[in-house]
Amino acid sequence: MPPKRSTGSKISVAAVKRTKSTSESYSSLGSRHAERPSKTVRRDASPVPSNSENEEQEQETLIKKKSQPKPRKKSSQQESSSLKRSNDPNGSTNNSYAVTESSSSNDQQKQKRIRNMMDMSKEEVIAAMQDVQGRFKFLKQLRHTEAETHLGECRAKLEEVTESAENYRRQIEPQLQSALQSQQVLRDINETLNAKVRTLERELRDARKKLEQKEREERIKTKDASIVSVLASPDVTPRSAITISTLHMFENLSGFKITPKDISSRSAKERVPSIWDCEHTGKRGTLRFTLTYSTTSSLVTYSPKIDSKKDAELLQFLPNYLTVDIEFEKEYESKFFWRILNFTNEQA
């Protein structure tokens, strides 16, 4: 168990009293020796002192030696302080006497400051306060350097920016969610509309195919009717009827339709038709054109019949020389015919 503090304080007070008494005794002894009259030696006398004077000087030196305090052993105060140090559990070496003296001196300084402040005027008090504030500010600046101050400002700004960004994120997040939801709704509507468009396009293609098939059948029926009417005409000879029947058979076998525009009458039995309407249907579409034979030369004229709307798909693959009128010799008719067949029957 550590010793109580009260015991140490009693020992320190007793030690202070002993030290005061010893110092007073030393001072009284010194004052007695100082009051004793001393004989002075006149230096302006003869240079060699007499025996009596030497004896007096020796006596004075002896008296001075006796008056000086002898070295003493440890006093009771020192013993009490050493005892206090040995009993201290924390192992502190502070002297209680020094502590009491420092505390008393601090109290005296405080009282002196209070008296000085009470004697000061208002202006002096303000000046003193400003001085204290300036010192405090200087010490505060020493505590916090300029770099640390800048770092603190940067941290404060960073926290402010982070907080504002977080607030903005919280504000914009609901709007973003609603925008994403509306985008998803629009995407679903777009997919539905695209499906409807694809269905309508498919129906449109089917309708076009049916319409083309119907037009083709109507043309065939019209041409058959025209051929039948021509054959039934009284102006048609048996030879021309055989020719028309042959052309009709050729059309059924090859898909190449040939229809004469002018048929020979009985008055001109040897005359051959000079204008022929031709039509060939293949994988790329239907090509319609007219072949005109010259009566004065051996030239044949090719004149295409192309509609930009109906034949839009055909125009994508049709060569440029088949889109304009061309002329060639009769000897190249077979070559021209096979080129037409190859073009219309090629894979689209």
Image (cartoon, grey):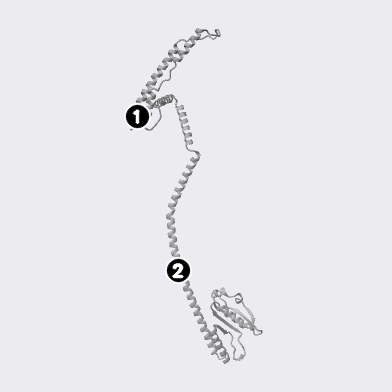
Asked where in the image residue 182 lies, by quadrant, the reply is bottom left
Label annotation for residue 59: none
Q: What residue is disc 2 on? A: 195
Q: Tell me the crowding category of disc 1: few under 14, some 14 to 19, or many 20 or more residues within 10 angstroms, Cα based.
A: few
> Hey, which quadrant is residue 105 in on the image?
top left
Q: Give me the residue at 50% from left, 39% from top.
A: 146
Give how far across and how far down residue 184 sits, in percent.
43, 61
Callout 1–callout 2 Cβ contact below 8 Å: no
Position in image of residue 119 (x %, y %): 43, 24
Residue placed most toward the observer, 153 or 220: 153
- Element carrying mark 1: helix
State whether residue 40 is above or below residue 293. above
Of 15 and 133, the residue lying toward us:
15
Q: Amino acid at mark 2?
A: Ala
Mark 2 residue element? helix
In this view of the protein, which residue sits in the foreground, 300 or 95?
Answer: 95
Q: Which residue is mark 1?
A: 5
